[in-house]
Image (spheres, rainbow, N blue to C red):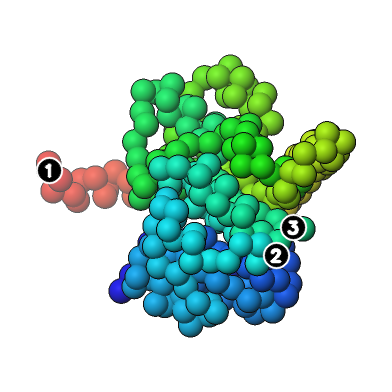
Amino acid sequence: MDFVYDMTVDPDAPNNTHAFALAMVGHNKSVLEVGCAIGYFTKAMVKRGCKVVGIEIDPAAAALAEEWAERVVVGDIDRSEVWDQVDDESFDVVLCGDVLEHLRDPLGALRSAVHKLKPDGVVVASFPNVAHGDVRLSLLQGDFAYRDLGLLDRTHMRFFTLETIRELFEEAGLLVVDTKRVIVPLFGTELEIKRENVRQSTVDEILADPEAESYQFVMRAVRDNGTQAVAALARRVSELTDQLDHEGVRSAILRQDVRETSAANTALHEQVANLLKHVEALDGHVAGLDQIIAHLNGALAESEQRQRALLATKSFRMMAPLRRVYGILRSLASPKGS
């Protein structure tokens, strides 16, 4: 049986949701994985020494995930009874990887998740960014077509921006302390917006928002203990991590641009070198032709010189009357009309 949400997790992949989430979960943790699907991410966490309990609505997928999980609870995350099958305050991490946007009541589910955390536990969650520039351009063109996967996945019931995600966490009693971004450049998503159909002024306006190319957000949050100083510190930490992440992302993009430019330059240099080789070969061929032409010109000049010398001899001049008589006799001997 094929499952839509089946993929390979590479912990070292750059600019990747799974790699970011795996790093935030850490090693040797007790994890409640909400929406574990067939267990592809479960497997990656278990390899890092984690013990995982999963929740999954699809019984067939849950059966496959049980190969890696301690156990899998089958049920609807939107219904409170599924949460009752998991002990409170028993997990270091509650993981909600691209799950909450599929729920009717993401706030209710997140509040239930908080109850399952140990006092010093964390929630790790990822969300697609509905404010990505390609979605904005799509709307400007009057289009909001759903897809099987991606930003406008047809199973999404809620849509989030960076600010609305943070509001969701706050309402659930959590403080965001770390945010990572998966960057997909404008015109680079599955929405397939054509660059030639968009004015440069519109592109400039959209890119003025630093989150315009943020495709997904991966966040780590802790319990809000109600202390104002802690909340203020968490907000400051979040601001600083945002700034660092933006700078890191831009540096990565610039490095990629440099690599691509360097690769293009290398290819161009190779083309130029090949052209120079062809030019050198042509130069050699032309030089050979020049030598042949010079030889022929020399032979022609020598022939002309010999002809002039022949015309200048006394014997040639004395033979002129005989050549005229010969010419007359030859014309008389020729048939008429020939």
Residue at x 42%, y 50% (from the top left corner): 78
| Residue behind mark 3 | 119
Which circle's residue, 1 or 3, is located before the other in the chain?
3
| Residue behind mark 2 | 92
Q: Is residue 185 visible?
A: no
The kind of residue tagged 1 is: Lys
| Residue behind mark 1 | 336
Which circle's residue, 3 or 2, is located before the other in the chain?
2
Q: Quadrant of residue 171?
A: top right
- Between 326 and 32, the one lying in front of the other is 32
**Left or right: residue 66 compared with residue 228:** left
- Between 226 and 259, the one lying in front of the other is 226
Residue at x 53%, y 36% (from the top left corner): 160
**Left or right: residue 321 compared with residue 225:** left
Which quadrant does the C terminus fall into?
top left
Outermost residue toward the bottom? 67
